[in-house]
Amino acid sequence: MTRAIAQPITPELVAEHGLTADEYQRILEALGREPNITELGIYSVMWSEHCSYKSSKVHLKKLPTAAPWVIQGPGENAGVIDIGDGKAAIFKMESHNHPSFIEPYQGAATGVGGILRDVFTMGARPVANMNALRFGSPDHPKTRHLVAGVVAGIGGYGNCVGVPTVGGETDFDESYNGNILVNAMTVGVADTDRIFYSAAAGIGNPVVYVGSKTGRDGIHGATMASAEFTEDSEEKRPTVQVGDPFTEKLLIEACLELMASDAIIAIQDMGAAGLTSSSVEMASKGGVGFELDLDKVPQREENMTPYEMCLSESQERMLMVLKPGREDFARAIFEKWDLDFAVIGRITDTGNLTLTFKGEVAGDMPISSLVDDAPSYKRPYQIPAARPYLDPHDVPATNDPAEALLKLIGGPNLSSRRWIWEQYDHMVMADTVQRPGGDAAVVRVHGTNKGLAISTDCTPRYCYADPVEGGRQAVAETWRNITAVGAKPLAITDCMNFGNPERPDIMGQFAGCIEGMAEACAILDYPVVSGNVSLYNETNGKGILPTPAIGGVGLLDDINRMATISFKREGDVIFLIGESNGHLGASLYLKEVIGGNEGAPPPVDLEAERRNGDFVRSLIAEGIVDTCHDLSGGGLAVALAEMCMAGKMGAKIELKDSPLPLHALLFGEDQARYLIAAPESRSHQITATGIPATKIGRVGGERLMIGGALDITLSDLQSAHQSWLPAYMA
Amino acid sequence: MRSAVIVFPGSNCDRDIAVALQQITGGPVHMVWHKETHLPDVDFIALPGGFSYGDYLRSGAMAARSPIMREVVSRASDGGPTLGVCNGFQVLTETGLLPGALMRNADLHFVCRDVGLRVENADSIFTNAYKAGQEITIPVAHHDGNYFADSETLDRLEGEGRVAFRYLDNPNGSARDIAGILNTKGNVLGMMPHPERLIEPAQSGFGGGTDGRRLFESLLNALVTA
């Protein structure tokens, strides 16, 4: 035994590994002996919150995961849906919150790298990246540095790999001051008959390591992601990995080249917990054992211990099980791409993960104990009571609606994100047919007229005010955004970002959001096919707003029948679809203009969502409507302003008599609503249907005029909307 | 018209330009791996955008020394029509086929957006389908597009009509708003904007032009009738 292996296991060491005394007792029982340090490290990462979902899995089971078009739901590297003509869309969203706070450039960059690997490991060529970012208050001294680093990191990685970053969302709120959220999503396309899974099979078959060499970076990243932050978290910078997008590009091409053959039995990327979790997951899914010779692992540094090799989170690495005899064929492909290729072990029938190092056994653990014996907690939870309804008459009116609108579209949360997305190559691959800035991004399925529509959404202030309603709304908003471009929403991935699950109120936020999401997914036929949970998003005991970020994917049958938000023709008639009740509880008007934050979020009527959305989608598909925008934060006035700015055309809106106060009509955030515009000659096709459709005005001129309430020139709208972020980042 | 697209390990616009060439010229497009030492018999060579060898040091510097580039330099020096887009432009300056260098953008940020260009020379094999002085829109996407050369070189480029495209609203700090330049013989063009990204209406979301298309049509005019 080497000295490292002989290190005594003390209670302090157990605690340092994030394991409780009870959990350590489970390890002793599973092994029937004391673990060595390498084994302790492996149990620690496999049983971490990040890898085991020990606090969340009892709730995650409530989410709908099936539909006729779902090929693979949660449990694999990414979810897979059928998009017709023998093609599948493969996608997932994942968090990289803690590393991005500590080291924003590399944290965000490796977040992109990790999610790309999750997708191409299943045989898909990545075709689009998205992200959902939450930063602290703009006034916080760290925020600007974090925005600059995260944006540069996402761009630096995605641009080099050559996958377009086509959209996302960015919000600012003080609850993220000490714990930003960086959620990255990748969508890929594969042939339905060439999808690769991670279940290892075939006793004696070779286990092959490809990609970058293993170094000492990122050791215990998964454990870090499973603990709260404190002031000294910055000292954890060495646990953040360093990304190499060039190697990732080589790895994508080499893997896809090998995947065109029949040499691969199973493949899995090395993500959190690196070599350990990839081999354990592959063996577990296949019901087999793995024997790995750690001396064969390509190493970047000298004298690495088994502990370090097993827990390293060095990037750009993959593990594969090959058909016997195909090693040389595969090796030639990886050598062509100048990547390491090493047979490091074989499949056994022992059911154990057996590690050898310098001729001795460095670890020997039952795979089932690492996976199936992982603790599962039914943590106590209390879903916070929904806040009471706030009557719009009780919300102070603004005496200058124009100024209120300019403040909203020129403020931190609704101003243009151009400064961000111009740093992302959003056009590489030459199939981006709807660029950032609209309701959903659309990428063409290469060589066809079909498009994939993608949107990431969440309204954390709603989730905080009422977790169940907020969960419903997050799902519904992606569904609506995808609908607004004319696509049929098919499935979602989720990235559940919450605080400390050991606190019943936080666990209640989690359970509540899941409940709302489950209901929305069921009614909208919009299942969850992949996802990720990020808990302990707290610093010094202060939790973030509950943030279940949703990434939705939909299918556009014909990109020639696609809607965008821009007004296109003078004289087009503008219709508001859906019902307006002037809901101002938990609204942006309340937060940004009045400086309040009370009331219930807007109720989500899922049947109305479905009815109104199906109607709007049919209008787009039939070519009746090519201009459409969903209404969300900031309500009608903000949506109109965005449509004017995108089309560089004004609009004149008539306000009919209403029992609602003016500020509620303008800024209310009622759900299930869209604005559409079409030539007069098609008006009857919009109104004669029984769906609430109100003609509210016409496109034209160079001003946005809303009744007698508001009159703003396009250039004033633009300068307010475009200037905030560049000025803030300057 | 037969084309070759050089594929470096980190090229990522190789497929895009191959699609444009196939669609517009109709001719065969050979993808040529950087480790090759011979080029097929072609009428035209394209060096695509991307991050050839990761470009962690100086963009295009390593690519300029890869095995296939000896052959590319030799063909281009003999008058073989050669286009470098974005990273391809960087590679061309690194080989010395074109003068000057592409430095980091003046504001230090990567920039991806449609930019307005003025066609300064509409007589070349790459630009004959445009009109001289025509204003067109083509996207850029780069971190190192800030064209630099000494003033003597810049004067010579301008005096000899070798500035092919100029930015209307300079996105990267390039000297004299230069977006693309020709070599002395006019058979080599390097440009930062990506014409292959705007060759059909879908690529602008059906709301913009297809101004990149003319560049490939120019080649077809020049090389097929020649």
Image: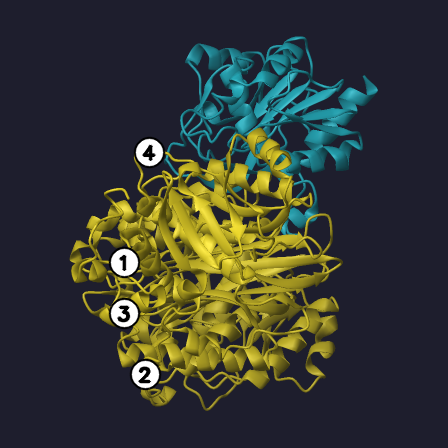
Chain colours: A yellow, B cyan
Labels 4 and 1 share a subunit? yes
Residue A390 placement (x, y as % from top left) = 35, 88
Asked whether the beta carbons under mark 1 and mark 2 sit within 8 Å of each other, the answer is no
Residue B160 placement (x, y as % from top left) = 58, 12
Left or right, residue A382 beside residue A576: left
Disc 1 residue type? Pro
CA distance separating discs 4 and 1 = 41 Å
Disc 4 residue type? Glu
Does label 3 or label 4 sit earlier along the sequence? 3
Q: Identify the residue shown where x is 51% and y is 34%.
A: B168
Does label 2 or label 4 sit earlier along the sequence? 4
The quarter of the rendered structure image containing the C terminus of chain A is top left
Residue A612 placement (x, y as % from top left) = 62, 80
Q: Any mark on residue A536, and which?
A: none
Q: Which residue is mark 4?
A: A301
Q: Chain of mark 1?
A: A
Does label 4 or label 1 sit earlier along the sequence? 1
Helix, strand or loop for disc 4: loop
Does label 3 or label 2 sit earlier along the sequence? 3
Can residue A717 be seen from the camera position used here? no
Q: Is residue A346 above or below residue A647?
A: above
Q: Which residue is mark 3?
A: A25
The 10 Å Cα crowd at callout 4, few under 14, some 14 to 19, many 20 or more, is few
Disc 3 residue type? Gln
Q: Which residue is mark 2?
A: A381
Residue extending farthest to the top is B78
Labels 3 and 4 share a subunit? yes
Helix, strand or loop for disc 2: loop
Q: Nearer the viewer, mark 1 or mark 2?
A: 2
The quarter of the rendered structure image containing the N terminus of chain A is top left
Helix, strand or loop for disc 3: helix
